[in-house]
Image (cartoon, grey):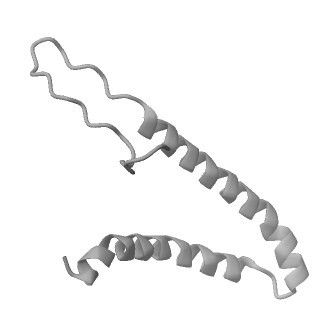
Amino acid sequence: MSPLAVLGPSLSRFCIIQLLAQPVVLAAWLLAPSNVEQGITVLAPLAAVMLVLGVGLALRAVRSSDVPRPARSAGEESVAERPRGANVRGPS
C-alpha cells in the first residue's frame, strides 16, 4: 500500500474539518468589533455554547457506538456479530 493511500482518510477528515471551521472563523472575525476587547466579550458566550454542543455531540457519538445492535428475528440467518471498537490485541 502506498503512503499516499494510507494518508487518504486522514487527509479527507482534515479537509472536511477545515471546510466546516474556516467559514465559522471568518464569520466570527467579521462579527467582531474593531476594538478587540469588546469582540472577545461578545464572542465568548457564543464560543462557550459551541464548545458545549461539540462535547455533547462527541459524547452522543461515543454512547451510540457502544450500543449493541438489535437481535435478528428468528427467520433470519444468524451471523456472528462483529465486535465494535479497536482490536489492539492487548488489555484495554
Q: Quadrant of the N terminus?
A: bottom left
Residue furthest to the top in view is: 74
The spot of residue 86 in percent (x, y) is 38, 49
| Placement of 58 over or under 60, stated as above or below | below
| Placement of 55 over or under 81, stated as above or below | below
The spot of residue 36 in percent (x, y) is 85, 84
Return the residue nearer the eye: 58 or 6: 6
Kindly indicate the quadrant of the structure image that contains residue 42: bottom right
| Placement of 34 over or under 41, stated as above or below | below
Residue shown at the point (80%, 66%) measured from the top left:
44
Kindly indicate the quadrant of the structure image that contains residue 9: bottom left
Residue furthest to the front in view is: 90
The spot of residue 10 in percent (x, y) is 38, 72
Q: Is residue 37 left or right of residue 67?
A: right
Return the residue nearer the eye: 3 or 12: 3
Q: Is residue 59 left or right of residue 91?
A: right
| Placement of 85 over or under 54, stated as above or below | above
Q: Is residue 79 left or right of residue 32?
A: left
Residue shown at the point (18%, 15%) measured from the top left:
73
Return the residue nearer the eye: 73 or 52: 73
The spot of residue 25 in percent (x, y) is 62, 77
Q: Is residue 27 left or right of residue 85?
A: right
Residue shown at the point (57%, 44%) measured from the top left:
59
Residue furthest to the bottom in view is: 34
Residue shown at the point (63%, 51%) measured from the top left:
55
Return the residue nearer the eye: 44 or 2: 2
Number of numbered discs: 0
